[in-house]
Structures are given as structure tokens and as C-alpha cells.
Image (cartoon, grey):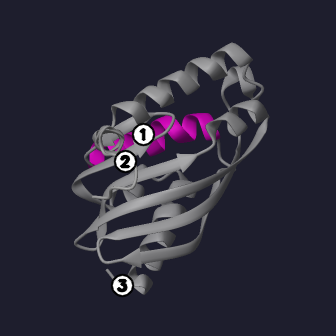
Amino acid sequence: MTEQEFVALLERFTRAAEAGDGEAFAACFTEDATYHDYIYGPHTGRAEIAHMMGEMFHRDAGPDYRWEMFDPVCAGDTGYAWSLSSFTSTIPAFAGRQIVIDGMSRFRLRDGLIAEYFESVNGGVAMVQLGVDAERIAKVCRRWAGWLLDKPATTDYLARPKGSRR
């Protein structure tokens, strides 16, 4: 994929997300794609991805959700972009609180679409903005730590001696 094609895909991707249009969002992905969301977990296949965006995420983030990508870089089948997103929570316990999230996105690309999506955000900053209590933040961070430590890439990395590279 060229840089220009990647930029166009990111525009479709974020516009569909902002609109809460799960079908248009899922159309940015291959049929067998996986979206790894740091809150809602992994979703595989267009139907699951559409449901996650349209029914789960927008249920909680509300109609003012914004997501903008900056500094996109694409090298063949891999793309990266920094992003800012914001929303006003509709979750009853946190309703009305505005949240701003700073993130990095990694895309595995195939046939002009997203085959796998990964995000890295400081969810602790988002939870503090929501007003989540400290014990719940710790519980969520323990779950995220478990996900990180269970990744095959992490296991491989930790098994190699310092100074070695794949």
C-alpha cells in the first residue's frame, strides 16, 4: 500500500468511527481481520468489528466522539499513526465527563484493507479523566499487564538475551 492509499484508508476509518457507522467501519477491514481494542478486547471478522464500533463503543462514547490520525507512515503491509480522540462519556457512572486520549495505532495491511489493528494508549489517563476509582484502575491495569505478558511477541522478546535481535 502506498502512503497516499494509507492516508485515504485512515480517513475512511476515522470518519466511519466518528459517525458510529459500524458497517462502514468494518468495510475498512479484510473479512478475517482482527481489531484489538484496549477496552473491549479483540474482535475478529467484519460482523464483530461492526458490532464493537456501532453497538459497544458508540453506546459508551456518545455522539460527540472524534478521532483524528496524524503523522501516518506506511511501509508496504504495515502502517502507523499517532492519534487524538475525544468523547463525552455516556456510561451512567461517568456520564457527562469529557475524555481526551492520545494513542498510537499499528495496522497490518492486506489488499488495500486493514487485516489487523493494534492500539497503544495510556488508558490510565483516560480512567482518571472519567473519575474511575483507584482499585478499579489497578484491576484494569493488571488485566492489560496480563495481555502484554501473554503475547507471543513478548514471550519471544523476553526469551532472547539482551543485545540480540530477531
Q: Give the quarter of the figure containing the C terminus.
A: bottom left
| Apparent side of residue 162 relative to residue 123 in the rendered image (left or right) | left
SS type, badge 3: loop
Tag shown at residue 52: 1
Q: Earlier in the sequence, mark 1 or mark 2?
A: 2
Identified at 35% across, 68% down, the residue is 78
Q: Amino acid at mark 3?
A: Thr
Q: Residues within 10 Å of mark 3 (few under 14, many from 20)?
A: some
Q: Does residue 17 appear to the left or right of 46 in the view shown?
A: right
Contact between labelled residues 2 and 1, with CB atoms less than 8 Å apart: yes
Looking at the rendered structure, the kind of residue marked 2 is Tyr
Q: Secondary structure at mark 2?
A: strand
- Can residue 89 be seen in the rendering of this structure? no
Residue 40 x %, y %: 46, 33
Mark closest to the chain's N terminus, 3 or 2: 3
Comparing 125 with 98, the one in front is 125
In the rendering, which numbered label is found on residue 35? Answer: 2
Residue sitting at x 45%, y 78%:
8
- Front label number (1 vs 2): 2
Q: Residue 153 location, x and y as percent?
A: 31, 45
Which amino acid does the dot numbered 1 rest on? Met
Q: Which residue is mark 3?
A: 2
Disc 1 residue crowd, few under 14, some 14–19, many 20+, Cα 10 Å: many
Number of residues whose C-alpha sits closer than 10 Å to that of mark 2, classed few (under 14), some (14–19) or many (20 or more):
many
Start and end of the magenta stretch? Answer: 46-61
Against 52, residue 165 (above or below) is below
Q: Is residue 165 magenta?
A: no
Rounded to the nearest angstrom, the CA distance separating label 3 from label 1 is: 28 Å
